[in-house]
Amino acid sequence: MKVKVHWIIDGVAEIEAETPEKAEKEVEQKLSTFMGEQSDLTELLGARAIQGKAYLPGSDDQEGEIIENDEV
């Protein structure tokens, strides 16, 4: 029996860069290189896209702080 599994990998990379666009480009290049080097795994998992968006840390995203939210 074939079963399809839709998966999402979520992560946040902290990159030193001059601009958010340069940070996005650096992460994109690293992930693209990794995916290219792991072509068998990429094909097996059916990876089709890499997507990300850079942002500057705000008051809710302070370095070293764990924020817990009991509201769901």
Image (cartoon, rainbow, N blue to C red):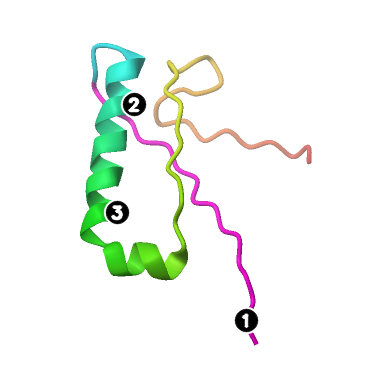
Q: Which residue is mark 1?
A: 2
Q: Residues within 10 Å of mark 3 (few under 14, many from 20)?
A: some
* Magenta-colored segment: predominant secondary structure: loop
Which residue is pictured at 45% across the width and 19% down the height? 55
Q: Quadrant of the N terminus?
A: bottom right
Residue 35 image label: 3
N-terminal label among 3 and 2: 2
Which residue is pictured at 50% across the width and 15% down the height? 58
Q: Compared to 30, does 19 lie above or below?
A: above
Q: Position of residue 72 (x, y in %)?
A: 78, 41
Q: Compared to 54, does 72 lie above or below?
A: below
Q: For this view, does 59 lie left or right of residue 44?
A: right
Q: What residue range appears in magenta?
A: 1-16
Q: Residue placed farthest to the bottom in the image?
A: 1
Residue 54 inside the magenta-drawn segment = no
Q: Position of residue 53 (x, y in %)?
A: 46, 26
Residue 24 image label: 2
- Decide which of 5, 71 is in the foreground and name it: 5
N-terminal label among 2 and 1: 1
Q: Residue placed farthest to the right in the image?
A: 72
Q: Compared to 27, does 20 lie above or below?
A: above
Q: Secondary structure at mark 1?
A: loop
Which residue is pictured at 56% across the width and 58% down the height? 7
Q: Secondary structure at mark 2?
A: helix
Q: Nearer the viewer, mark 2 or mark 1?
A: 1
Q: Amino acid at mark 1?
A: Lys
N-terminal label among 3 and 1: 1
Q: Nearer the viewer, mark 3 or mark 2?
A: 3
